[in-house]
Every structure is written in C-alpha cells, then in structure tokens.
Image: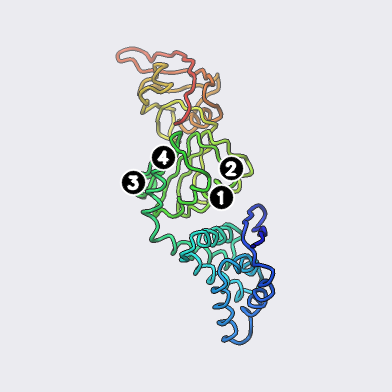
Amino acid sequence: MSRIFRLAIGLSLVVTLPVARAETTAQIAEWIDQLGADQFSRREAASRSLADAGRDALGALGEAIQRDDLEVASRAVEIVRGFLESEDAELAGDAEKLLESIAEGPQTPVSALAIATLDFHHLGMAEVAREKLESLGAVITEGFLPSGRRGLLVVLNVRWHGAAEDLRLLSRLRGVLQVGLYGVPLDAQAIAALGRLRGVESVQLFGTGVADEQLAALAAKLPEARIDVRKGGKLGVGGQPMIGPCLITQVQEGSAAAKAGINIGDIVLRINGEPVANFEALTDRVGRHGPGDKLELDIERTVPGAPPERFSRTIELDGWE
C-alpha cells in the first residue's frame, strides 16, 4: 500500500503526493540519481523506467524537481508531463497539481518550464473547462476592458456552488482578462488558483473575506493586474474613475442608490462628512463597508434654470451578488 509524503514548495504551498512502496523505493531513488548521469544512454534509460513506474515514482520526481541540478529537474518535469496524458485520471490530476505547485513557486528556469508545460497541456481543455465552470454557476462572457483588449470576463457570485478545487479550471480558459468574485469566500487554495491567471488585467474581490497575507501573495503573482478588494457593500452606481468631480453616470435599477433617490447626473460631494474628489474615491470609501452598513452622502443636483440643489441621503448598502 502506498504511503503519503508532503512536498513543500516555497514558503506556503504544500502538495500531497504518493510515495513508492517500500520495496521499490530504493530502485526509484537509483533511477532518479541516474537522471543526472554522464552517459546519455543511462539518463534515457532512467527516464523510461521512471515513466513506467507511474504513480510509484511521482513523489520522488517531485523531490527531484527541487534539486539544484537543472538536468535532473528538467527530466523530472518532462516525465511528470507525460503523466498528464495518463488514462489514470487520479495520476493525471496529481501530476497537474505538482506542476502547478512548481509553477507557483520561486521564479526559476524549472518553474518557467512547468508553466510552459501546463500552458501547452491546457490548450485543448479550454472548452471543457468553460462548460464545467458554467455548470457550477460561473458567468463567462466576452467583452472589452478600458485597455482596449477583448477577452473573457468571468464572474462568480452567490450562484457559484463550486469548491476552491474547481477554481483551478480558470487557468485552463484562454484570454481571461477580468475575474470578479462577489460574496464567494476565498482561502489559500483559491488564491493560489487565481494566481495562475497569467495575462489577467483585473481581479475584483468583493465580500470574499480574503486575508491580507493571501492578498499580498496574489499581488506578487499578478504584478500587472489591478486587484480591487472590498468588504462587500454595494452602492449600485457608475462613474468615470480618476476624473473629478464625482459625477454619477449610471444608477443600477433596484440598487441601494436607486432606492435612496440618487439620479444620473448627481455629484457626490461628501461621504460621512469627508470630501470625495472623484468616483475612484467614492468606490474606495464604499469598499471599506459591508452589506447593511449605512452611509450619509451629500449630493449636488443640477436644476434647470435654478441654482444647484444640495441635500443629504442616508443609504443602507446592498451586498454583491
């Protein structure tokens, strides 16, 4: 019966992999050492033997990938890549998780190789991944971002009934530019899955309960992405970021703002007595509050043929869905 060992990758990632039976451990260790042999024929023979060993060799291969010897590590990655095509679904899944863990670790030639291997593996799996995600409640559409790029926009809200494990499917989609998670609790495993979204421009985490250290880890993995984190309170308005004053250009029907009588064209002057310079500042202030919190907004409204009207509204925030 197989034993289990835990392979630590970097500072916080841990992968559970099978270890060979005791009677084969010594032979597998010998084959691992031969991956770095001087003779090409011995290296090739060892690679074939480890590939044939399958599940029994996976744990040892995980350790070999962490060696300083690039020849050994690269051959180990190539052997694990072969397991991705195995008819043994459990072996293929464990091999994919191992490569994902290597890809999420420190940036090295081996991690770059793992990333390239996974990208190639996922090319033919995008449609299946999309169907699975949508069956679990994800909303996937195509559209443009302010950058002008067109790609996939993925939303997970209260209708999402998948697990953190299912978020791994996101990295199999092609051209994901924006991911929004609204009211979906996130843990370290889910954050690790989001960190695999190379090329994503925007990640919105509203009411997810993400911890500060997890957020820092995600930001490190996605340095080019804009990560918007809010506690989950929703006002339900739109505007032009970074352009003052804070002019409301959109009011969502049935939202907290609509119920409070906020109109398109209104200008938000203050929130709870603090001045608001632009719409970006408004979203930042609202994002510090959760559903059910009450905010007092000072509003200026244009009145045709008369001076602008100023008034206050106390608004109870909705939650993101």
Residue to which mark 3 is pinned: 142
Question: Is 188 situated left or right of 317 in this image?
Answer: right
Neighbours of disc 4 within 10 Å: few (<14), some (14-19), many (20+) = some
Looking at the picture, how far across and down is residue 281, in whole percent?
50, 31
Residue to which mark 4 is pinned: 137
Which residue is painted at 52% across and 59% down in the image?
90
Residue to which mark 2 is pinned: 187
Q: Are marks 4 and 1 in contact (CB under 8 Å)?
A: no
Neighbours of disc 2 within 10 Å: few (<14), some (14-19), many (20+) = some
Mark 1 is on which residue type? Ala
**Closer to the camera, 183 or 275?**
183
Q: Nearer the viewer, mark 4 or mark 3?
A: 4
The Cα–Cα distance between marks 4 and 1, rounded to whole angstroms, is: 20 Å
Q: Are marks 2 and 4 in contact (CB under 8 Å)?
A: no
Q: Earlier in the sequence, mark 2 or mark 4?
A: 4
Which residue is painted at 49% across and 19% down in the image?
316
Which residue is painted at 67% across and 74% down in the image?
29
**Closer to the camera, 88 or 178?**
88
Mark 4 is on which residue type? Gly
Q: Nearer the viewer, mark 2 or mark 3?
A: 2
| Relative vertical location of residue 93 with respect to residue 290 in this rendering, above or below | below
Question: Tag on residue 192?
Answer: 1
The Cα–Cα distance between marks 3 and 1, rounded to whole angstroms, is: 24 Å
